[in-house]
Amino acid sequence: MKTLQLELGPRSYPIYIGSGLLDQAKLLVPHIKGKRVAIVTNETVAPLYLSKLRAQLAAFQPVEVILPDGEQYKNLEVLNRIFDALLSARSDRNTTLIALGGGVVGDMGGFAAACYQRGVPFIQIPTTLLAQVDSSVGGKTGVNHALGKNMIGAFYQPRAVIIDTDTLKTLPARELSAGLAEIIKYGVIRDPEFFSWLEENMDKLLARDSSVLAHAIHRSCQNKAEVVAADERESGVRATLNFGHTFGHAIETGLGYGVWLHGEAIAAGMVMAADLSRRLKWLSSAETARIENLIRRARLPVRAPATLSSKRFLELMAVDKKVLDGQMRLVLLKSLGQAVVTADYPRAELEATLASVRDAA
Amino acid sequence: MKTLQLELGPRSYPIYIGSGLLDQAKLLVPHIKGKRVAIVTNETVAPLYLSKLRAQLAAFQPVEVILPDGEQYKNLEVLNRIFDALLSARSDRNTTLIALGGGVVGDMGGFAAACYQRGVPFIQIPTTLLAQVDSSVGGKTGVNHALGKNMIGAFYQPRAVIIDTDTLKTLPARELSAGLAEIIKYGVIRDPEFFSWLEENMDKLLARDSSVLAHAIHRSCQNKAEVVAADERESGVRATLNFGHTFGHAIETGLGYGVWLHGEAIAAGMVMAADLSRRLKWLSSAETARIENLIRRARLPVRAPATLSSKRFLELMAVDKKVLDGQMRLVLLKSLGQAVVTADYPRAELEATLASVRDAA
């Protein structure tokens, strides 16, 4: 097992990464406050891992909340089901909420923990690659709104993140690839050495070589933890973690939540952001090609869907948390490994990217 | 005009109290961040004061959100209308949200500000006496759930609180009395000198003598600011501000939100808490009578509604944010001016209070 620490002063917490961690009550229990827990999971994950967790937590009379599976359920209405369950069980302010599942479960469980009685303790147990390398770390929680992704939420840090790499054995191939998108992102925006390592090890990652996967997860969490420690509330560098996300969120919202997986949308979004960076003559053609190739090798889409027009894309992109005072800021690349947040690009170049990085209709 | 400062380190903010403040753009504008504002108000307050505020804020292209009036609308569904409006107007993370109205508007506006894009700047302009002396100060925001009052929310401090005492001229008498309940509370729990002053000035308060009202508001905000500065997140002394509230919330939830005003329910709840304190031989009969008399003189209910059985009361009280690890903690009085939070009372005495402090059926 490896342990990373996310350094946030009084809100610091450990990230445990290893095999078989779901069976180790000694990791989990010290982070539980109070005498009761509530487990939030979904209908896909529950049959696989809920009994394992329940077995460890019998002394804490766990309340169990099983949500439907999918990004289309990440909304206020489904969030309210968590509150229904907590209140029906008379869960108090000392109840520790545990999110067991992928990014949607973690985002909703974390937001429920942030809001229930104005805040209860929270633990993340991510079971998808995407959640393990990205969404479970750093305290971003929330739900979608019909008009925009992740528009309603809170910064709310967990007390611990427990990553059992064995859960990846049951992950569908499409979800594995979706997680690889966020892993590739760290290489692209700030860790070119890791990018090269990913180029060398992509086949092993897809074959689920456990030690190679464990390294990729560790290195990704390390990158994320460094960025979050430097800028918890995203007033600066943290925004670079949204590389590909303004484009990607537009795809997710435009197609309807759940049609493309988040990681898939981000994959195409990263190719678009790289393409725009190349048009600005910041990124070389060779670097742009390396990014696109690695994403393609991860079995991810490298083009936006044909059904979204450029006009619709621009409308959707205008509803982004990085928009400030009417300026649409984007995360672009000065080079492979160096991302910047900027509104300083000609609109015509953005439109050229939208027109070209798209599937043929 | 008087100014108080709520001291919370980097989250400190001023509370302005005076006549005609709604016309003074110079008070409001320095607290606005960004180039745009959104005003959240309700259908009762909008015709009275919205145009005044709008006139000052023309340069900030105000988005206006007009909610229905009443505690029964303080829920997640109506909250979502605020998000609908913000997203439709493409409000960004620099949009300052201004709550113009009573406690419900302030609680919902504040919670919307806490959650929209994970947090936007927020200003409180309370227009009811209750909001001016209590709910607009201290950063408690949130909505109700069918199973419990204020169960979903956030601690989220405003950047300023602007109290224009002229707004009390249009306040219905019932709402004035409701505000007096929270004013009396400060006297009861921590300021016996103020309690005596209220006994002397209750008739003037009811007659809306503006200088007497202004003093009562100032002294109440001072009390609240001191308590919140000492314990922002309610890990200790702040809970004493909930004197009467465990009983009162049970009345509000039990009757259905909006049937009794919050201040009315808290009034009866304070009489119940005083009665229980007397049964424990902490509070003298004379002090108990003074409390009940002052509440009665403020034209507030001093008995719980007959329709709520003791059994139902106990069920509803068990869903309270002060319940911890199964123990129902209550705010009780050691004497007039000295409140404590305790679970150390015989259940039989609580039941005796529930049986006796109730309207005849």
Image (cartoon, coloured by chain):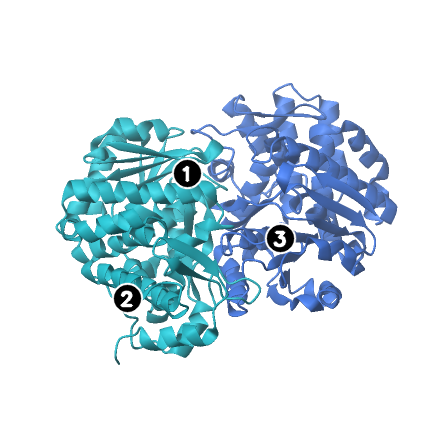
Chain colours: A blue, B cyan
> Residue at (47%, 39%) from the top-left corner?
A319
Q: Quadrant of residue A353?
A: top right
* Residue B133 or residue A77, whichever sits in front: B133
Location of residue A285 in the rendering, given as x and y in whole percent from the top left corner: 71, 23
Q: What's the residue type where badge 3 is placed?
A: Phe
Q: What is the CA distance from the residue labelled 1 to the residue labelled 3? A: 32 Å
Residue that carries the numbered disc 3 in the rendered image: A122
Q: Which of these two is toward me, A228 or A130? A: A228
Q: Which chain is disc 2 placed on?
A: B
Res. B90 mark: 1
Quadrant of res B59: top left
> Circle 2: is it few (<14), some (14-19), or many (20+) Cα within 10 Å?
some
Q: What element carries label 2?
A: loop
In the displayed orientation, state which residue is furthest to the bottom: B361
Residue located 41% across and 37% down the image: B91
Tag 3, which chain? Answer: A
Q: Which amino acid does label 2 sit on?
A: Val
Q: How far apart are marks 1 and 2 (CA)?
A: 36 Å
> Relative to the observer, which residue lies in front, B130 or A49?
B130
Q: Which of marks 1 and 2 is in front?
A: 2
Quadrant placement of the N terminus of chain B: top left
Closer-to-camera residue (B58/B230): B230
Q: In this view, does B168 lie to the left or right of A294?
A: left
Give the residue pinned by disc 2. Answer: B259
Label 1 in the same subunit as label 3: no
- The location of residue B115, given as percent across then percent down, is 47, 45
